[in-house]
Image (cartoon, helix red, strand yellow):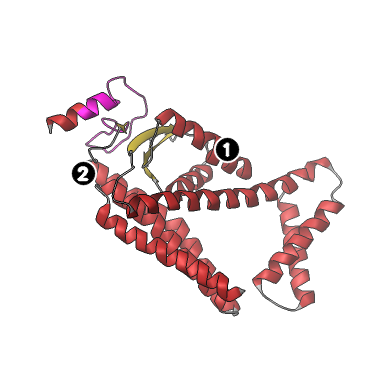
Amino acid sequence: MIDILIAVLSTIGALAIFFASVGILRMPDFYLRLSVTVKAATMGVGLLLLCAAILFPDISVTTKAFAIIFFLIITSPISAHMIGRAAYFTDTPLWKGTIVDELAGKYDKETHELKDEVHPDDTVTEQQLSNKNDAE
Amino acid sequence: MIKQFLMNLLLSFIWVALTGSMYYTNFLFGFMIGFGILWIMNRNESDRRYFNKVPRIISFIFYFLYEMIKANVQVAYDVMTPKYFMRPGIVRYPMNAQTDMEINLLSMVISLTPGTLILDISEDRKTIYIHVMYLQDPEKFIKDTKTGLERRLLEALR
């Protein structure tokens, strides 16, 4: 019973990591790559650690595995957020299929402050974005 | 609230001490038994909050796992098939969460759901900007997240 459970969970975990690595190759722009990689890798490593926790009937292994999963879940969204934010500051281009970018023009380029109030000409509509892509 | 939680922990430690096997399944079982005992013994209305909160937290965890697996399957399908089904976009999302803890947990949960990625939080901490992979319509996405993930999270926290 436990063998089957471990087999299923570790297969799903390994597949999640595999999809993440294929995603790095296949996704068309930086943000999508980041988006695919971070979560799938977190889920995959988490599942493999969970398998280790179930397999070894030793309390020290279990507590360590759960501690690693806990810190992984806490830290990986933060690093993804920081990398994505830095990429947006350095004007990493979005994919041409991007339909809306409501963050455009909201940043103060000098101080990196994010204004909240919405100006009507700040939001880039789908029409403007496709025009911009055509111009490029 | 905190009194009931400590009482519950104490009861589960007593269960572990009495049964003698220090293993996490046994601890969880003791916690469940302690919760049941406290729930039966509960008399005054003011202590009712704890008994509503624990099931909500557990149901939120299961809802989050379900959403995560569902979105992971979607992303995996898109990665493995030759055609792209994505419609990415950056959405401005006004939050209901107010305190630091709520904002932290909300952004963590949204970031861990595949297909969504937090890009930044505004200075006045009212809106977050989310990069979404499968965006049919920004209004619909905001409505779905508000009524699904955020409502459940805030119900579990408040």
Question: Within 10 Å of the Cα at label 2, are there few (<14), some (14-19), or many (20+) other Cα atoms?
Answer: few
Please tell me in which quadrant of the rendered image residue B22 appears. bottom right
Residue plotted at (44% across, 28% down)? B139
A130 is higher (above) or lower (below) than B30:
above
Total numbered labels placed on residues in the image:
2
Q: Chain of mark 1?
A: B
Q: Amino acid at mark 1?
A: Arg
Residue, disc 1: B151
Q: Nearer the viewer, residue A83 or A16?
A: A16
Q: Secondary structure at mark 2?
A: loop
Q: Amino acid at mark 2?
A: Thr
B10 is higher (above) or lower (below) than B119:
below
Assess whether residue A103 is covered by the magenta stretch: yes
Residue, disc 2: A90
Position of residue A16 measured from the top left corner of the image (x, y, whole percent): 41, 61
Residue plotted at (59% across, 80% down)? A58
Question: Within 10 Å of the Cα at label 1, are there few (<14), some (14-19), or many (20+) other Cα atoms?
Answer: some
Q: Which residues are magenta?
A: A102-130
A77 sits left or right of B33 in the view: left
Residue plotted at (74% across, 72% down)? B16
